Structure formats: structure tokens, C-alpha cells
Image: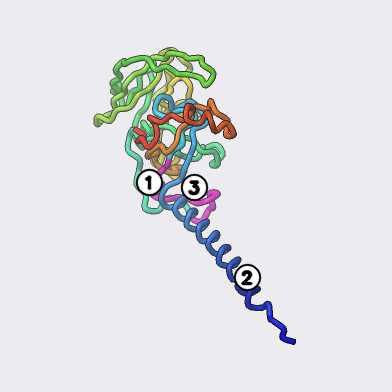
Amino acid sequence: MVFRSSSVPDKKAKGGLLESIKTVVYAILIAMFVRTVAYEPFNIPSGSMIPTLLVGDYLFVSKFSYGYSRYSMPFGLPLFNGRVLAKGPERGDVAVFKYPRDNKTDYIKRIVGLPGDRIQVRQGLLYINGEAVKRQRVEDFTERSPFGGSMRVAQYIETMPGGRQHRILEITDEGQFDNTAEYLVPAGHYFAMGDNRDNSADSRDPSAVGFVPAENLVGRAEFLFFSTDGSAALWQFWRWPMAIRWSRLFSGVG
């Protein structure tokens, strides 16, 4: 009688399982490395950056644009203090940062004030170092809901010192933060505002965001890779083509 050993198939099965586990682990490590040092995906849950960013936009943020801090690390691990390879944002950048009140929540706003700048809003107009930032009235922005409703809002092109332009919304020039005190941006901090000026919690409110520490910067918003208007649930695959905002896909964030 000849007995056949099953040790070789068992070894092959175990070897195949081990290789599969290694592949998964390597993939996770590579993804974490890319997320930490290169690009991290974010989604937009609120309308504070309309018209630049809409609810349902998904975008990539470049982690290397401003260097690295503890908040570049997964889970904000305190591996070091300050920033490594630090480079400050430019005025007009759309940046992701950790909310200074808890250092955990991700916020996305436009950087309008650099260290040493004097920032003020008067009757809806942004002033930087005593000079009014030019804004030009353009066509109304029509905000549509997934359920058929719509609202028209006054839209402007705002031109930063240096010529950089972006669009903003202003429902009124007499809102809560349309007339503020003058803020002096401290060293190592930045002043951030939402493009939807009357619907944004930002640096104009010291009890909310206030000045943004340089260490809290996560990265610069670069481009959209997906966008949906929310009219289709995940399981309603037959409605996906109508819910996707095709024209926004792979567009830059300006």
C-alpha cells in the first residue's frame, strides 16, 4: 500500500495565503505613504465654499504644497512639532486645515490673509492692508437642490492683490460678518474665509475658526476627481449618470 503525503499541497495553500496577505499589507502601506506625503482625498459636506466647491464634490489635496506637520500624519500622530520642508500658502489658495478649536476636524477655506496682514470686511467688501479688494458683479449663481428647488444668489469675481481671481457669493452686504473689526494676522498664522461669504464659519469669527496656525495646514486643494448632486442613493445605480456632475470631473480648484 502506498501512502501519499498531503504536506506539499498544504504548503502551497499556506504559501498562497501568505502571499495574498503580504500583497494586501503592501497595498495598504503604499496607500498610506501616498496619502501622507503626496495626495489625500476629501469630500465637501457643506456649502461654505460655493461657488468654487459644491456639496458632493470629491477632491485631492496635495500634502507636499506646504510641507509636513503632525497633521500630515495619519490620525495626527505627534511624531514631531512644527513643519518640515515648510512653505507658506499663497494668498488665494484653497487650503484644508485642522479646525483650531479641536485640531481634529477638517475645514476647507480660502487663504486671504498672510502673517502680518491687516484684514477687515466693510459692507461686504474685503480689505487687505487698508486697500479694498476689487470685486466685479457677474451673473447670478443659481443653486439647485436635488429635489427641484433653486435659489439665485449675487455672484462676484474677486481679484486678490497680485491679480489672482476667484468667484464669491454675497446674499447681502449687511450680514453678521460683513462689517468687522480690523484683524492683524499674527506671525505663523493665516486668515481664511469661505467663498460663500454669508454662509461660512471662518476667521472672521474669533469664537469659531479665528486665525489658522501654520502647523494646522494639511494641504492645498488641487483638483476634483468626482462630484454628485446627491439626487441618487448608492443603491440607485440607474440614476447615477444623472446625479454625477460630469462637467466638474477632473477640474482644477481655483
Residue type for callout 1: Tyr
Instruction: Check the picture and name the quadrant holding the C terminus.
Output: top left
Q: Earlier in the sequence, mark 1 or mark 3?
A: 1
Q: Is residue 174 left or right of residue 102?
A: left
* Rendered location of residue 27, percent (x, y): 50, 57
Name the foreground residue: 213 vs 252: 252
Name the foreground residue: 113 vs 151: 151
Taking the spot 51% from the left edge, 28% from the top edge, the residue there is 46
Taking the spot 28% from the left edge, 23% from the top edge, the residue there is 131
* Rendered location of residue 28, percent (x, y): 52, 56
Furthest residue toward right: 1
Cα gap from disc 1 to disc 3, whole angstroms: 12 Å
Cα gap from disc 1 to disc 2, whole angstroms: 45 Å
Taking the spot 55% from the left edge, 64% from the top edge, the residue there is 22
Taking the spot 37% from the left edge, 27% from the top edge, the residue there is 119
* Rendered location of residue 248, percent (x, y): 39, 31
Cβ–Cβ under 8 Å for marks 1 and 2: no
Q: Residues within 10 Å of mark 1 (few under 14, many from 20)?
A: many
Please name the residue that numbered disc 1 is placed on: 66
Residue type for callout 2: Lys
Q: Which residues are magenta?
A: 60-80
The mark found on residue 14 in the picture is 2
Cα gap from disc 2 to disc 3, whole angstroms: 39 Å
Residue type for callout 3: Tyr
Q: Is residue 75 magenta?
A: yes
* Rendered location of residue 173, percent (x, y): 41, 13
* Callout in the foreground (1, 2): 2
The mark found on residue 71 in the picture is 3
Name the foreground residue: 214 vs 253: 253
